[in-house]
Image: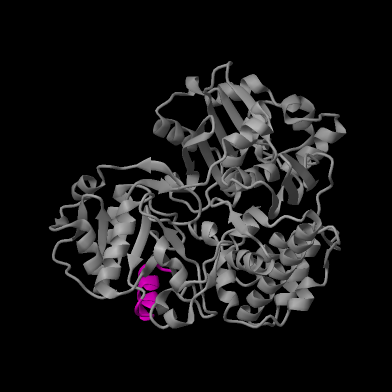
Amino acid sequence: MAAILSVLDGIHDSAAALFDDYRVIAAVQRERLTRRKKDGGPPEDCIDEVLAVGGIARTDVDVVVFQRSNFARFLYRADPLRRLRERIRGNRLSSRLLYYAMAKDGIATPEEALDLEATRAFYGFPSSTRIEFANHHFSHALPSLFFTEWEEALLYTADGSGDNVNYSQRLFKDGKIDCFFGDDRWLRLPHRHESVARGYMYVTQALGFKPMHHEGKITGLAAFGKPVLREAFAKPFRVGDDGVIDAEFESEAALRNYYVGLCRGHRREDCAASIQAFAEDTILASVRRLLQRTKVSRLGLAGGLFANVKINQRLAEQCGLSEVFIVPPMGDEGLVIGGALQYLLERDGLETWLRHRRRLDDVYWGRAYPDAGSRFLRFSPEIERLSGDPVATAAGLMAKGQAVAIFAKRMEYGPRALGARSIMASPERRDINDSLNKRLDRSEFMPFAPVIAEEDARAVFDVTDANAYACRFMTITCDVKREWKERIPAVVHVDGTARPQIVRREENALYYETLKAFKARTGLPAAINTSFNVHEEPIINTPEEAAEALLDDRVDYLLTEDGVYGVRGRGDRAS
């Protein structure tokens, strides 16, 4: 068995994951530790956290895997070849310029440019620790195959850019993985400007939101507008017969100026609807042509663009798929999972690697706090534990309109709250959206998501064999059945869709049993599940952060396996 540490040192996100060969021991994003959303930079604290969770020291780490697209910081810190430092100035090296400099100097791989011993010393690893590098888009793609049992599939990734590539398209068939586009050409390719994700990013910026941060708001806002700019947004892009996406932009500045310019003078809702429609149309056309070419019916998706749950819904519904799976940490935070899997693939070979595959049960990969309840009480004398069974008490409070935050198990990894750090509430009244969003300082147009037990899901939502696995991780939307839209209005978006989480008892008994008890009281099989965080803050991590949110009136109660906790004298009130 080998202890494998996979590290992301990103500008907008840093993370680390610890593997015991093919098993994920722990994974954490830096934002959960620093409490700064999308926090990038030195990942030392992430490394400390996952090693602590795994109970091992740096001297026990056999392999460290870095992402090629994020190793520039290590080159600078580790005193790389002098000609690279002379050629590129600044204390944060541009990876794109670095690639060009390396190519000009005849340096083919990061290993040739990096002082490995200095890097080990910087992070405190012994000389026996191996250092490996992973390809950005291959790291995105591999988890979408590893966490299935598929015999054949199309693996498709898309994001703003990684290793000078914006997409990758791979076919898994006959026990082989063949790459059509986006393979190890990271050093030789010129930087391309055909990224749908970057077009989406610049529209996000043009509408007054934070780029590479608030794209999900644009997806939600799109339902309120009309795609009046759909054709204009699509005009510079082409999808070839081979499924490859291309565009006519000569520079990234040209791409940015085009989309920002088109948005001027138009309602933000219409701009959002237009970029959403363009993105859906383009990716759908690309995937359809690749599926026709490959003759497969299973689709694995990863990369930041596939955080877009509406794109994922159209792919699931309009491509004749048997199944779609979106890597739950689909953004760059997922690279630390794929990076370790790439190393294992290269170490053991594909045949052995395939034998270790398995369906993903959960992404509870953070730190557990079994003493959370006692830490709530120590945090403030204002916090008290309610008497009675926790499940029955929580369900009763939800039925009366209270917002109950569940704090259980190990913290989730990735962008979704999945029942370890979630806020639960009744979906029966639409006005809870306004009141709860106000308490959490969130945008009024963003919908809440529902959680539902697996056995009830298909009666309420258009859950099928194609999207059910994805629904377990809230990575896809689907239509709400007509007879349920008025009964659970708080979790139905204006376009009639919802982003459900399907939950099973074996993954999270407290979450599941609370949901079933709520159904027994109200007749409603679904409840609100929204992430336990205030707007512009990461999802709650520690018991102290949860207790502070309770005292700040962000939620009404906290639920753990040993009890329900509230504020003395506050009493029940409708949210």
Task: Residue 444 in the image: state x and y as whole percent.
Answer: 46, 76
- Examine the structure image and report whether residue 430 is included in the region drawn in magenta: yes
Vertical relation: 134 (above or below) 272: above
User: Image quadrant for the C terminus?
Assistant: bottom left
Q: Residue furthest top?
A: 127
Quarter-of-image position of residue 279:
bottom right
- Examine the structure image and report whether residue 190 is included in the region drawn in magenta: no
Tell me if I can see residue 56 in this picture: yes
What residue lies at 29% left-to-right and 61% top-to-bottom? Answer: 514
For residue 420, side relative to residue 447 (left or right): left
The span picked out in magenta is 428-442
Task: Residue 214 in the image: state x and y as whole percent.
Answer: 56, 64
What residue lies at 71% left-to-right and 83% top-to-bottom? Answer: 228
Task: Residue 286 in the image: state x and y as whole percent.
Answer: 77, 62
Q: How is the image coloured?
A: one colour
Quarter-of-image position of residue 91:
top right
For residue 119, side relative to residue 89 (left or right): left
Q: Camera-side residue: 119 or 556?
A: 556
What residue lies at 60% left-to-right and 68% top-to-bottom? Answer: 310
Vertical relation: 400 (above or below) 147: below
What residue lies at 54% left-to-right and 17% top-to-bottom? Answer: 126
Tell me if I can see residue 549 in this picture: no
| Magenta span dominant secondary structure | helix
Task: Residue 381 in the image: state x and y as whole percent.
Answer: 15, 53
